[in-house]
Structure formats: structure tokens, C-alpha cells
Image (spheres, rainbow, N blue to C red):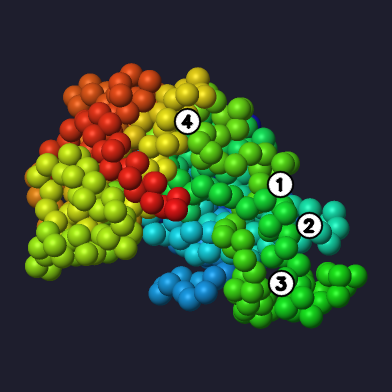
Amino acid sequence: MKLYKLLFAVSLIAVICSCKSDPMVVKTTTGKVQGVMEEGTIAFKGIPYAKIERFMPPQKADPWDTLMVCDKYGPYAMQTGGFPGTVMSEENTCTLNVWTKDTHAKMPVMLWIHGGGYATGHSSWNPGYGLAQKDVVFVSINHRLNILGYLDLSSFGDKYKYSGNVGELDIVAALEWIRDNIRRFGGDPGNVTIMGHSGGGGKVGSIMCMPSARGLFHKAIVYSGVIVGTNTTATSSKLGEAVVRELGIAPEEIDKIQTVPYDELNAAGQRATAGLRGIAGGFAPTMDGEVIVSQPFTPAFADFSKDIPIIIGTTLNEFGTNYYGKDITLEDARNILAPAFGEDTDEFIEAYYEAYPDGSLQDMLSLDRMFRFNSVVSCRGVNANNAAPAWNYLFAWQKPSDHYSAHGDELPFFFNTIEAEKRKVPEVTPELKRLEKIMSDYWVSFAYTGNPNAEGLPVWHSFAEANEPCMIFNINVEEREAFDSHLQNIIYRHQRR
């Protein structure tokens, strides 16, 4: 009998130890999940982090009893159009993905919020294995978008008080999931960096103005996403009322909107938006004084985010008209620029060559005039108002296919995934591998310490340490101070007219 008990105890201990040591299975607060190997990391895809009801704030995800195999991305948010190989869902939108090398470690966490404005997008656009290979835990999310995420029905009663911001509240729910679960994936919930591109960058700005997110993140990165002018309740509620009128729903029967098919709801939203003036943000976050308490990027963020170090940057061309491959004379350039800059056209040309002495006419005409100024202004604001530092970058490498540095072209370099981006990087040269290493190393250092600088990297000064320094990422990585301030001031001056 004693031998039997001993053998049973040994077997039980072996089972317990094997469960603890299995890195592919993790027990979350709602159930067990099983990951898959991906590029030297363990990927857990499609984990539910919240359950949702239309226009209501997210709630904790329902628990499950069986082992959930997390080997594919979850459904993406309802939106116009679609993406091959994936499915949309309204009820099961709130899922996240985790990449880790070691589920028993304690590594920094990087939460990625995809681009696509506030209307479209999906977490599968930017896989996280590349940064996870460098000893961080990478998380990406799907959340509610467009009319489902940002329709403000607050004027119809307290039940819908938060409907205009449920898309942002989903992100907070994901941060809460990270706080409660990420240790089991090898992550440190006390060291979380939020980062987003384009609309995702705008959402990062909103999160930095949301009291409910306070303490759930510790650093921030905004890629081409300084979006100035969040809606206010005064404007967004008008849009909500217009949508209800388009649907023919009486105010006292507002709950009928819960069962309107998505396509019909979305079409009513488009008609309502087209019929109103002054709703520049459309279906976007609302500064309501409670969920979002201040306007992001004006020029900084809410006071409670003063201790958040931040990196803000853009690409050289973004959405600028592509003039590469076209024969352009100086007179042609003046004629192209004159409608935008009028009597200041020659000053603009002179300021361009001050900033870019080796630039071409095609470079000048294709330059971004949309994002860079606001990114610099936000860095100035953070530097003036915050206790934490701000760093600024410009991604200037141009694809050989179109000689262009477009909106989003920087992402595979920062994410250490250029080998998989044949469309953006058709030939991976040693010089490009070096650029990728430098850029992704900055990101990992920032995730660990709140400062992108590390041994072996070019020194990158914050706005507090030099005169508006900008790290320019190209084949030659270099930092320049206030190099295009004259040029950007001309652009801003004419945007305001």
C-alpha cells in the first residue's frame, strides 16, 4: 500500500509539473488557451477579452471549460468591404493575440492598436512575432469600429450614455485583460507600452485622456496618428440624432436600433454624416468629459498622463501625391505649389531646400504636408507640460518600386518583419537589415526602460535634451535638430487659411 501511494504521489507530481512546464497551454482568468509556434515564438490568436452588446460598454468575457485552441485570428469588426481569408462579426469582435518567447519570464508588454482610421482595420495586418523574438510580449487587438464603436446616442437617455466611446472602452477592457492575465504569458503588467498607427495612433491619444486607463499602461508610441480635433458631445450627439431620424425610429422607441441590420445601420450613418456640417470626425471618439476628459494632442494629453514617455513620428511622404518618375521643371513645381501656397510659393521652395539640401523637385512635391507638423507640435506640448520626455522620428527610406515612403511603410522595420513584407521590401539587403535592427532595437529598449537609447545605437535625444531633435531613419540613420521648422511653419500657415 505504501508503495502504491508513493507511486501515485510521484505520478501526480509529474502531471502537475508537466502542466506547469507546458509553454503552449496557459490558464487565463476565463479559461485555458493553447498556442502554436510561429517564427520562433508562441502565438495565441483570437483570445476573447470581452463580451459586447450593441452600443453598450464591454463586459468581462464569459468563461469556458474546454481547452481553447488559439491558432487563428478572431473575427474582425463589422465594416464596409472585407479582407480575404477572414470573417467579420458583431458579437465576437473583442479578441486579442499574444506572441511570447517564454511564458515563464517577466518581459515588457507592447499593445498594438491597428490603423484604418476609426472605420476599418484588423489585428492580422501586423503580426507580433518579430518584436517577440527580441524578448517582449506583443499583444494586438480587434475592437468595435465605425458606427458600432462610435455612435453617440447619449441624448436618448442614460442607457446609451457611453455609446459614443464604446470602441475606446473596448481598448481599456483589453488593457484590463493584460493586467489580469499577461503574467501567465511571460509579460509584466507593470510595464506596458501602448502603440498605434494612423487611427490607432489617434486611439493612443484618446487612451492617454481616459481616466479608466490610468495605471494600465506606462509608455506610448504614435505612428502617423496625431489626430487633432476629437468630437465633442455637442457635435457627436447631433450625428447620433441624425442617424436615428434616417432610420425612422421614434425617440421613445430608441431600443429598436439594437436590431437594425448592420448594413442598414451603416448606410443610415453614411447618409447622416453627408447631411451634416461641422462633424469633421464622423464616427470617432467623443470628448465627453467623463470617458475622455480632454482633447488629445492639443498639444499634449490629460494631466494624469504627464508621466508617460512617448515617441511620435511620421513618414516622409505619407499620403502626399507621388510625383516620382515624372519630368518636372522648377517652373512646373511652382505652378503645382501655387494653389496651396500662393505668394509664399518661392518661400516654400527655399525652405524645402534648407531642410533637404539634396532633395529633388519630385521629393519636394511629394512631401507629406499632413502629419509631420502636428507630430512636432505634440512633442513640443509634451516637453512643455509633461514630466516625461518625448522623442520624434521621421522614416525617410523610400521603396524602390515607387521611390516613395508611404503611410505605414515604416511598420515592418519597427516590428522586425521586413522579410515577410515583399510588397514593401522586395529585396532585403544588408543595409535594410541593419536599418530594421536599429529601429526595432530602439523600440525594445523603449519598452524596457522608457528610453529608446541603448548601447550600440545612435544617440537619440528627447525634446528636453536638444533643439527639437528628429531621428531620421534611412539607409544612413542620423539625428537633426529643428531641420525643417521653417518649412513646416509655412505648411501650417497655409493649412489654417
Label located before the other in sequence (2 or 1): 2
Q: Disc 1 to disc 4, how far (Cα)?
A: 22 Å
The residue that appears at 13% across and 62% down in the rendered structure is: 331
Using the numbered discs, state the Cα–Cα distance from disc 3 to disc 4 in whole angstroms.
36 Å
* Residue wearing tag 4: 381
Sooner in the amino-acid sequence: mark 3 or mark 2: 2
Mark 3, residue position: 243
Amino acid identity at mark 2:
Ser
Residue 485 place in picture, x, y as percent: 30, 36
In the rendered image, which quarter contains the N terminus? top right
Disc 2 target residue:
154
Q: Amino acid at mark 4?
A: Gly
Q: Are marks 1 and 4 in contact (CB under 8 Å)?
A: no
Q: Residue furthest front?
A: 343
Q: Residues within 10 Å of mark 4 (few under 14, many from 20)?
A: some
For badge 3, the amino acid type reads Val
- Of mark 3 and mark 4, the one earlier in the sequence is 3
Q: Earlier in the sequence, mark 4 or mark 2?
A: 2
Residue 288, labelled with which disc?
1
Q: CA distance from mark 2 to mark 1?
A: 10 Å
Mark 2 falls on what kind of element?
A: helix
Q: In front here: 386 or 495?
A: 495
Asked whether the residues under the numbered discs 2 and 1 touch, taking CB atoms below 8 Å apart as contact, a structural biologist would say yes
Residue 199, x across and y down, in percent: 48, 54
**First-in-chain label (1 vs 4):** 1
* Dots 4, 2 in contact, CB < 8 A: no
Front residue of 305 and 428: 305
